[in-house]
Image: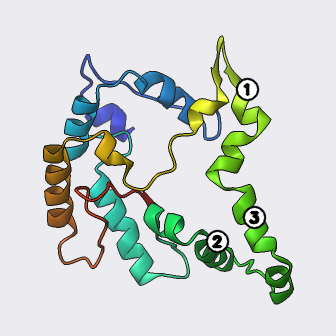
Amino acid sequence: MVIKRHLEARDTDVLLATFPKSGTTWLKALLFAAWDLVEAFRQFCDGVSLFGPFWEHALGYWRWHLERPAQVLFLTYEELAADTLGQLRRLAGFVGRPFTAEEREAGVDRGIVEACAMESLAGLEVNRSGKTDMAESSVPNNVFFRRDVVGDCKNHLTPEMARRLDEITESKFRGSGLVLPRATTHLGRVWL
């Protein structure tokens, strides 16, 4: 009802309304696959995205994490990449299923890290040659995997774009205690 009363639609607006777990990610990928990087970057910096302004989104969860660390786990991509095993253990503890001493001794946690490594997942037959069907089209499963490299933004953003992103991030997060890696070093991603 609020949207109905306040939304002023424009000719260029795209509304994506789906039920959770019904192909939303796939549909977004199809919809925005040819989206120009310069325009996407401009919109991101202006706080326009499918999920609202990134910085306010991240700060909201960061603050909630500080207030209720037992209820909100704040984990960055860089932390996960730097210490996957340690972060898996942290995640297991957070969801109330910590690895037992016996499981750790048997290497269960290490086995999970190996099985879920990007190379392992991308190498599965279903992800190499399989397709995801939806309606009248299908998409190869391998499109859901990208380079698993921290700092890959340097291959996509200009130095000016990285500088602008750093300035906005530093301004938005100033005083919060939240520090993300600099885009001029590499573009950080946050998983909440």
Dot 2, crowdedness within 10 Å: few (<14), some or many (≥20)?
A: some
Which of the labelled discs sits on residue 129, or is there none? 1
In the image, is residue 61 above or below residue 163?
A: below
Tell me the CA gap for discs 1 and 3.
23 Å
Query: Left or right: where does residue 124 sit relative to residue 39?
Result: right
Callout 1 secondary element:
helix
Q: Residue at x 33, y 46 (%)?
A: 153
Asked if labels 2 and 3 touch by Cβ distance under 8 angstroms, the answer is: yes
Asked if labels 1 and 2 touch by Cβ distance under 8 angstroms, the answer is: no
Q: Which residue is mark 3?
A: 112
Dot 1, crowdedness within 10 Å: few (<14), some or many (≥20)?
A: few
Point out the tag, 3 or 2, that comes first from the N-terminus: 2
**Closest to the observer, 62 or 150:** 150
Identify the residue at the far top of this view. 136
Type of amino acid under label 1 = Ser
Tell me the CA gap for discs 3 and 2.
9 Å
